[in-house]
Image (spheres, rainbow, N blue to C red):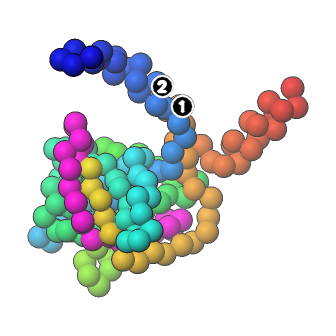
Amino acid sequence: MAGASAPVMDEVEFRQAIGCFATGVAIVTTEHDGQLHGMTVNSLTSVSLRPTLLLVCLARPSRTEAAVAKRGSFVINILGHDQAGISDRFAKRAEDHFDIPSLFSVRDDGLPVVKRATNRFYCQTEHLYPGGDHTIVVGRVTEAEMEHRDPLIFHRGKYRSLSDFARETALEWYW
């Protein structure tokens, strides 16, 4: 219906509903003007194979979102099942996420990477789009690394692993 305003969904209800969609957990990292930046994300998706594009949503305003826009390159670090603590650390705003050097390393190009991440995607920023309280970043993947470990999963407000889901499914199936 033209001109009619769409109904507005309650934010808490939306968060509970979308939380039923299990996602992986990643940390986006970058460097700009000698400062390292990073944030935890779970809105990440493959966009295209030709060219190789990923989409990630970064909270705004944030230092990481601004640094990705200015630097034009970033790393997506997919976390392993045993890295929930690192996810929590990078989810906190306005803190020095890099004050424990044993958690990360810095490449020759200055980009920080999370140690023991299951996968890393090195990206060049292709597009930035406004998306409500986030910036939608489309990155061209230029390189990838894989360590083949089970990923960290976020589902219904809790961290989980693939083995958690297997156990729960087996119990449900049994009963």
Q: Is residue 113 magenta?
A: yes
**Residue furthest toward the bottom?**
108
Location of mark 2 (residue): 17
> Mark 2: which secondary structure?
helix
**Residue furthest toward the front?**
2
Give the distance between the C-alpha atoms of the residues marked 2 and 1, in whole angstroms: 6 Å
Location of mark 1 (residue): 20
- The answer to which quarter of the image holds residue 69 is bottom left
- The answer to which quarter of the image holds residue 128 is bottom left
Percent x, y of residue 12: 38, 20
What number is the disc on residue 96? Answer: none
Query: Magenta part of the protein: which range?
Result: 112-135
Tell which of 9 and 58 is nearer to you.
9
Query: Can residue 114 be spotted in the picture?
Result: no
Q: Is residue 44 left or right of residue 92?
A: right
- Residue at (51, 45) in percent of width and height: 23
- Residue at (37, 65) in percent of width and height: 53
Q: Looking at numbered disc 1 in the image, what kind of residue is underneath it?
A: Cys
